[in-house]
Amino acid sequence: MVDMTEGNPNKLILKFAFPMILGNIFQQVYNLVDSIVVGKFVGADALAAVGSSFAIVVFITSIIIGLTIGVGIIFAQYYGSRDMENFKETIVTSFIFIGGVTIFIMIVSLLCIDLILDLFNMPNRLIKDSKGYLIIIILGLLFTFIYNLATALLRSIGDSKRPLYFLIVASIINIVLDIVFVLKFNWGVRGVAIATIIAQATSAILSIIYVYKSINFIKISKQDIRINKDTFKNVVKYSVLTSIQ
C-alpha cells in the first residue's frame, strides 16, 4: 500500500501514473503479437481476420474495463477515508455485479456472434477464422474481468506497479505460446486466441493471489457475500457511467 497523502504531490503522481501508462502499452501487445505471428506464419486472410476481430474485442472488453474503472473510484474513496466496512461491501458487491454482467455479455455475444460479425460487415472469406478467434476470446472474458477488478482494487490503495508486473509476465507468456501454437501445433488463428486467454488467465490468477495476500486488513467471510442495496446503487452509478464513456 502507498499513502498518496504524504510526500511531494508531483513525484507521487508521476510514480503512480508511469506504471499505468506502461500497462496500457502492454495491453496492446496481445493483439500486436497475435497479428505479427499470424501475418508472418499463417497468411494474409488470417491476419485480416484477427485485425478485423480486434475492433469487436475492444468494443466488448471496453464495457467490462469501464465498469471496473468506475468502481475503482469508490474503492479509493473508502480506502482514503479508512471506511473499511463500506470498502469491503463495495468489493463484494462489485465482484457480484460486474461478474454477473460479464457472464451476461459472454452468453449474449456467443449466441449473437453471427449477428455481431454481420454488423461489423465482416467479409465472407474471413468469417470462419474471425468466428473461431472471437469465440475463444469471449470464453476468456472472465479473466479480463478478474484482472481488471483486481487492478482497480490495487490502484485504489496506491499500488500501480503490481498490475504492470503481472501484465508483463502475461505478455511474455502470450508471445511464447503464440509461436508454439502456430509454428509447432499449426493451430492458426485459434492458436493465438488460446495463447491470449492463457496469458490473461495467468495475469488474473497472479492478481487474485496478490490481492488476497496483500490486502490482509480486510477479511471477507461467507457472511459478507451479499449485496447491500445502497452499495449496489453506488456501484451501478459509478461503473455504468464510466463504462458508457
Image (tube, helix red, strand yellow):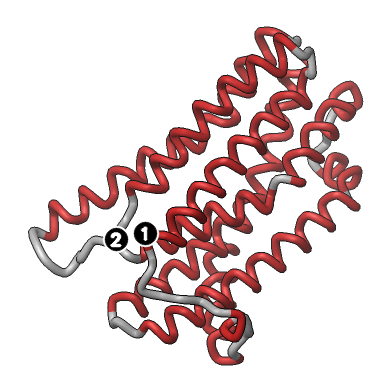
Where residue 9 appears, as percent x and y from the top left, is 13, 60
Element at label 2: loop
Within 10 Å of the Cα at label 1, are there few (<14), some (14-19), or many (20+) other Cα atoms? Answer: many
Tell which residue pokes out farthest to the left in this image.
8
Marks 1,2: beta carbons within 8 A = yes
Q: Residue at x 59, y 89 (%)?
A: 228
**Kind of residue at disc 2:** Gly
Where residue 219 appears, as percent x and y from the top left, is 45, 76
Q: Nearer the viewer, residue 20 or 48?
A: 20
Instruction: Tell me the quadrant of the picture where the N terminus can be found.
Output: bottom left
Which disc, if any, is residue 65? none
Element at label 1: helix
Q: Quadrant of residue 175?
A: top right
Q: Residue at x 49, y 68 (%)?
A: 70
Residue pointed to by mark 2: 158
Q: Quadrant of residue 158?
A: bottom left
Question: Viewed as shown, does residue 220 lie left or right of 7?
Answer: right
Where residue 103 appears, as percent x and y from the top left, is 75, 61
Q: CA distance from mark 1 to mark 2?
A: 5 Å
Instruction: Tell me the quadrant of the picture where the C terminus can be found.
Output: bottom right
Q: Quadrant of residue 199?
A: top right
- Relative height, residue 156 to residue 146 (above, below): below
Q: Nearer the viewer, residue 103 or 36?
A: 103
- Relative height, residue 197 to residue 103 (above, below): above
Q: Residue at x 83, y 36 (%)?
A: 121
Where residue 160 appears, as percent x and y from the top left, is 34, 52
Within 10 Å of the Cα at label 2, are there few (<14), some (14-19), or many (20+) other Cα atoms? Answer: some
Question: Viewed as shown, does residue 78 lie left or right of 220?
Answer: left
Q: Residue at x 78, y 54 (%)?
A: 106
Residue pointed to by mark 1: 155
How many numbered marks does the figure carry?
2
